[in-house]
Image (cartoon, helix red, strand yellow):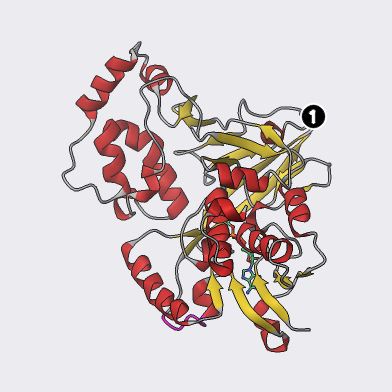
Amino acid sequence: MTYDFAIVGAGFAGSVLAERLATQAGKTVLLIDKRHHIGGNAYDCLNEDGILIHQYGPHIFHTNSPDVFAYLSQFTKWRPYEHRVLASVNGQLLPIPINLDTVNKLYGFDFTSEELAEYFKSVGEPVDDIRTSEDVVVSQVGRDLYEKFFRGYTRKQWGVDPSELDKMVTSRIPTRTNQDDRYFTDEFQYMPLDGYTRLFEKMVAHPNIHQMLSTDFNQVKDQLSFDQLIYTGPVDEYFDFCYGKLPYRSLRFDHQTLDIPDYQPVSVVNYPNDHAYTRITEYKKLTGQEHPKTSLTFEYPQDEGDPYYPVPRAENADLYRRYKQLADELENVHFVGRLGTYRYYNMDQVVAQALTLYKKLVGADSLHDVV
Ligand code: FAD
């Protein structure tokens, strides 16, 4: 059979496009993924003890986009959840992003918000041209807080010093002078009530969508027949790495279940300075599941393995631009998603990007018209 669209990758990018094209535009879609499941990196499942875990690390949904929220709400009910993270520093568990309580507890101060703002001014080191991840933090909160909360974590996460990383990495994390200890401040902060995989199952359950899992597109592409291709895998792989490999940072996930009901005070604790892992996630604190045991994931960053994080350095952006030029020349192939456009995107951003591509494919005027 000839499909209207073949879609490579059943993560948010591929699944949103499959859903819209099948249900709204009446197109036939072949949805291919080399993994044995849909959901991409947001996939969750019950482990052998019946605890819902995220196979590829913790995924917390947050967005400021009413359109994205309304769109996804067609496929799930939600559990209100505001993410809070603690960092283990000097034997204490302290709020991150850095806020009033972080500084007061760490140094034994009793600052007000105004006094903390003055303190940041006095310890912040002026940087004329903020270019690196180190510049961002040191200019805002000074060297000691940078060393204690950011330097070690960033070195573990990226394998390079923050002084060699684009400013965008640490710019994502705000500094606060109040006691707000939420990790995100977005208007919509929820977890899908029955998990992400259920959300994906509802999204792609349509007779026009044919799933082909455990299948690498590269192995079968010559046997497939389709009019247009939507590609959410790595863009460099599509072009046989003709300009060289785009670098990614990967992770090893060590999933463990303990025979105790409760392990840590919040769902995620960061370890900027100790241990080889960056953070520990306790899933019951994300999902609200009741269970006599608890499941954790320890994350170990590494170079080899599945591509997770595009490495934000100027030379990699240049290399990506060359691949993008090739991609732009292909009329019936569309690159989308985190790997297809070599950019760190949160889930909501990928959903918006996919809806935007759908809007373009069907010639709609606004995002609002297509959700
Ligand atoms: P993916 O989910 O990666 O899907 C791409 C799919 O393509 C994969 O399933 C892959 O198997 C498939 N594929 C690739 N090549 C081929 C091929 N040749 N043939 C067949 N299939 C192929 N976002 C948030 O909003 N909140 C969070 O808390 C959050 N936490 C994260 C934590 C971690 C550890 C990571 C790595 C990411 C996190 N994200 C988070 C980001 C989120 O995972 C992404 O935004 C989202 O998964 C991107 O969707 P995607 O469809 O672009 O890519």
- Asked whether 189 falls inside the magenta stretch, the response is no
Residue 331: where, in percent of width, then height?
51, 81
Question: At x 28% / y 15%, what residue is drawn?
Answer: 115
Task: Locate residue 280: give its quadrant.
Answer: top right
Q: Is residue 307 visible?
A: no
Residue 245: where, in percent of width, then height?
46, 74
Local crowd at mark 1 within 10 Å, few (<14), some, or many (≥20)?
few
Question: At x 69% / y 77%, what residue is drawn?
Answer: 4
Outermost residue toward the top in this view: 110
Task: Locate residue 233: give its quadrant.
Answer: bottom right
Q: Left of 23 or right of it: where is 355?
A: left
Q: Is residue 103 visible?
A: yes
- Nearer the observer, 65 or 8: 65
Q: Which residue is mark 1?
A: 290
Q: Quadrant of the N terminus?
A: bottom right
Give the total of numbered labels: 1
Where's ligand 1: which quadrant? bottom right
- Asked whether 240 falls inside the magenta stretch, the response is yes
- Nearer the observer, 24 or 47: 24
Question: At x 70% / y 33%, what residue is drawn?
Answer: 79
Which amino acid does the dot numbered 1 rest on? Glu
Q: Secondary structure at mark 1?
A: loop
The overriding secondary structure of the stretch rendered in magenta is: loop
Q: Is residue 150 above or below residue 305?
A: above
- Nearer the observer, 293 or 307: 307
Q: Is residue 324 above or below residue 148?
A: below
Q: Left of 275 or right of it: where is 75?
A: right
- Nearer the observer, 319 or 110: 319
Q: Which residues are magenta?
A: 239-243
Residue 325: where, in percent of width, then height?
40, 77
